[in-house]
Amino acid sequence: MGGLLVVVGAALSLRDVVGIGAAAVLLVVVSVLRLALERYDRGRGALRVVRRVEPNPTTRGRAAEVTLVVEPVVPTPATRHRLATLDVSEQASRELCTERSLRATVRREPSRLVVTYRLTPARRGVHALGPALAARTDAFGLVRTTRPLGGLASVVVRPRTTPLGTTRHTSAEAGATVSSGAAIASWEDSLVREYVTGDDPRRVHWRSVARRGRLMVRAEEGSGLPPSVVVLDRGLVVEHGPAARVDAGEWAVELAASLAVAMLRSGRPTHLLPSGSATVPTSSSGSAQAVLDSAARVHGATQDEAVTDLVATARALQHQEVRSVVVVAGMVTAEVVTALGRVGATRRTLVLVRPPQSPAEDGVGRLRAHGWHVIRTHPHEAVEQVWTAVHEETP
């Protein structure tokens, strides 16, 4: 409008109109420069942002409460005035929101601004939260600017897991399992040892005694037994593409995490190992938190990368003593079969995730000949059924 007055005044030789227009233009320019040069994170009027996410890590589909506090570094009347004139909004990755926009509650206090809202993560992973956006209007209401305020925060979203029962009353305690003629030792076989003089009689495991015909005791916790490993084929994980494929990949991640957590709760130190890992954890301990954090950070791989990664991990397992191995994979090429066939463990299980009605693969028979227990499943099958199949007496 000021520019228009300058043009009209000049055309009509009206100096007063030109002066008014020029003053209006100058006022806008000054306001823009003032707001553009204003910094919220430094100087006498500096503001700081404190963001809390509870819980963090969280679980896919579980609500998390976020509190964003904006307050002056040094409270003064000037900083309180600046804070009172700010409008603060938040930014979040779309994976953290089930709705298009965040519904926040803003509470203004004399020396701080508190924004609270709820997130319901829709996708597993490590997602960015922030920075906040601070909008401010100049004193004349002519110019409004928006700029980032504060830094980024990370929200770790773990996969959902299915609670699974322990292996009581299953073939894991009934004896060895047989798959295509190959004897497969039970989970329990790696949790007991022969009795030696001085062992506490209360540790005698009578089922193993009856099965083996000699005195067996439960292995002590922390006795240095090698860990168990659940390997997840990253080729199953699809980060971008049709929703059906993405969901199928997330089901595979949740399956692997559920199996690993169930094994931990059954008393077996277990680690979750995404394919491509060249180092196998040697610790005879493990925690559900570590398993879920590892699962949260799994990224997808192309088909070629998936084969290479799975072979690399299988070769790493060949040089590391492990008690049992469960591999959740989507394909078994000749290269993969060769590498897995050389893995030595008390029990070796392949959970082959394939679409329903998919043709059988030649590698399955070869793995069974190497002593692997092979289970065929498909996306969205009940995880409880897969867990039961892992321990059933015959496949």
Image (tube, grey):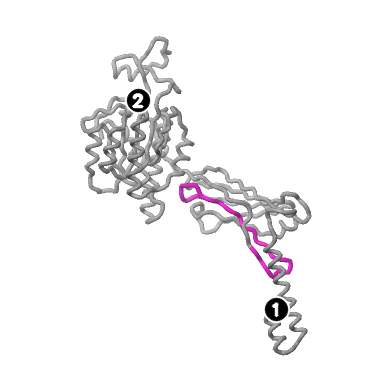
For badge 1, the amino acid type reads: Gly
Label 2, on which residue? Answer: 188
Expressed as whole percent of the image width and height from the top left, the position of residue 362 reads: 22, 42
Nearer the observer, 120 or 373: 373
The tag earlier along the polypeptide, 1 or 2, is 1
Q: Is residue 215 above or below residue 136?
A: above
Expressed as whole percent of the image width and height from the top left, the position of residue 21 reads: 72, 80
For badge 2, the amino acid type reads: Glu
| Quadrant housing residue 139 | bottom right
Give, as a single range, the part of the protein colored magenta: 121-145
Which residue is at 46% across, 44% downward? 297
Label 1, on which residue? Answer: 2
| Quadrant housing residue 147 | bottom right
Expressed as whole percent of the image width and height from the top left, the position of residue 10 reads: 71, 86
Nearer the observer, 91 or 235: 235
Label count reads: 2
Expressed as whole percent of the image width and height from the top left, the position of residue 268 reads: 41, 28
Does 123 appear in magenta?
yes
For mark 2, does the 10 Å Cα neighbourhood hold few (<14), some (14 to 19), or many (20 or more) residues? many
Which residue is at 75% across, 58% downward? 81
| Quadrant housing residue 275 | top left
Q: Distance from label 1 to label 2 (Cα)?
A: 85 Å
In the rendered image, which quarter contains the C terminus? top left
Secondary structure beneath label 2 = helix
In the rendered image, which quarter contains the N terminus? bottom right
Secondary structure beneath label 1 = helix
Which residue is at 44% across, 42% downward? 295
